[in-house]
Amino acid sequence: MSKNLIDPIVAIATAPGRGGIGVVRISGPDLGPFIFSLLGKNLLPRHATYLDFLDQHKQPIDQGIAIFFKHPHSYTGEDVLELQGHGGPAVLQQLLKRCLFVGHDYGLRLAAPGEFTERAFLNDKIDLAQAEAVADLINATSEAAARAAVSSLSGEFSRRINTLSASIIHLRMLVEATLDFPEEEIEFLEKYQARQKLCAMQFDLDEIIAQSRQGMVLREGLHVVLAGVPNVGKSSLLNALAGQELAIVTEIAGTTRDKVSQMIHLHGVPITIIDTAGLRDATDTIESIGISRSWDEISRADVVLHLMDATQPLSDLDEKIESRRAPQSVVLQVFNKLDLLPDTAAILDEAIYISAKTGAGLQELQSKLLDIAGWNPGQESPWLARQRHIDSLEQSRMHLLLAQVHASENDRVLDLFAEELRLAHDSLGKITGKMTPDDLLGEIFSSFCIGK
């Protein structure tokens, strides 16, 4: 849907379904005339007004509260009206239709996904990293992720980026001023301690990258697939990791015919565990479909837990798992039924031995998953981060390293030094939206829910 960012917009701002409260939100440049037409009265800014919401026949749709936020003191930076009524789907749809009917003469239209937050960004109420944090807070699946999203929304991530950007700009200013006086170029690096300042910037950037990677782990987690031949204990391991009986466990081979998925949290890190059908030559059509899906999951996994029976020899299918994994995925060899293994049995150093029945070895397995995710228990991220943030930070880091080369004793090409500083600064600007192309903005905000 094409968007005119001047049009007033409306949407149901609360999640679909039934609830005690439902909110219809309207935003636009000047809502005063629309508010009077809709409610029959003017509203004082930031005052809650209790009234009937009436249809075109003056019959009540609902009773609730109307709050008017006068620009620029609103979420979007425009005039915003919130109608807070009861959270029934039928009531909210009636109220939405009434707003659209009254607002036709004012150009009111349905909001596109994320358009309220997009307007907040375009009106300088928040930057792009904070805008993304709105969606991350809504979608947070753990307390740790929610805290980190709130930190991003409050501007902690942006402040670190802006502080580093300011340091780069200051050094750029000194360099570019020196370029007008070629005779001073050689003395510039020593006079302004340019190398030391550059090293300090690199240290700060490395710290931001490390914390951002931690934040990305909190946001995205891991996609873990349990794979192996029948009766090695995949379903038992899923139940043990989840702490509840999710999958049926029997001694009959092939009990699991389709995948069973469950999200768990380890130190706040979301990990999606998928139990798959046992890999073997299928005995019927249904099992064949389940096994085909198992191979599909293996090919998409971040981590494949290749589960084997510690008391049994390996099969030909066990050897195929490594070849069917995704190039970027990790395969962990996990031997189950440690409780049945004789004390004299040989143990492989690179494998993990567990007992899904007794819980032995599960803590080591969980720690290994956290290591793969990049989780550092002594370094909790103060913000959530996305892959595009990491990419921009790494680009900035590369340009600072090149700037260091041009500031070396053997090079001293200050015009190239200044250019690398400019490129490093531009890369950081992509995070907060100061240098972000329009097509990326469309991609980011289209992933938001309607009404946010």
Image (cartoon, helix red, strand yellow):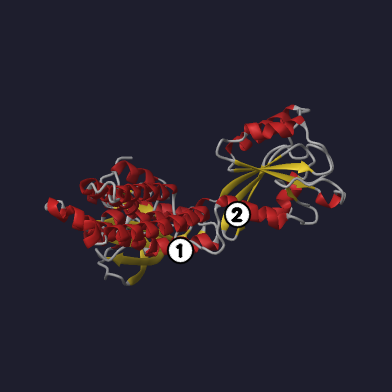
Precedes in sequence: disc 1 or disc 2: 2
Residue under circle 2? 370
Estimate the x, y position of residue 99 in percent, counting from the top left: 33, 54
Q: Is residue 35 visible?
A: yes
User: x and y percent of residue 278 in the render?
Assistant: 74, 37
Q: Position of residue 422 (x, y in %)?
A: 25, 49
Q: Element type at marker 2?
A: helix
In the foreground, 114 or 390: 390
How many labels sit on residues?
Answer: 2
Q: Which residue is mark 1?
A: 382
Say which quadrant the C terminus sits in: bottom left
Q: CA distance from mark 1 to mark 2?
A: 18 Å
Q: Is residue 245 left or right of residue 262?
A: right
- In the depicted view, which residue is nearer to us: 197 or 368? 197
Closest to the observer, 81 or 309:
309
Query: Dividing the picture into quarters, in which one does residue 233 lie?
Result: top right
Answer with left or right where residue 361 lies relative to residue 131. right
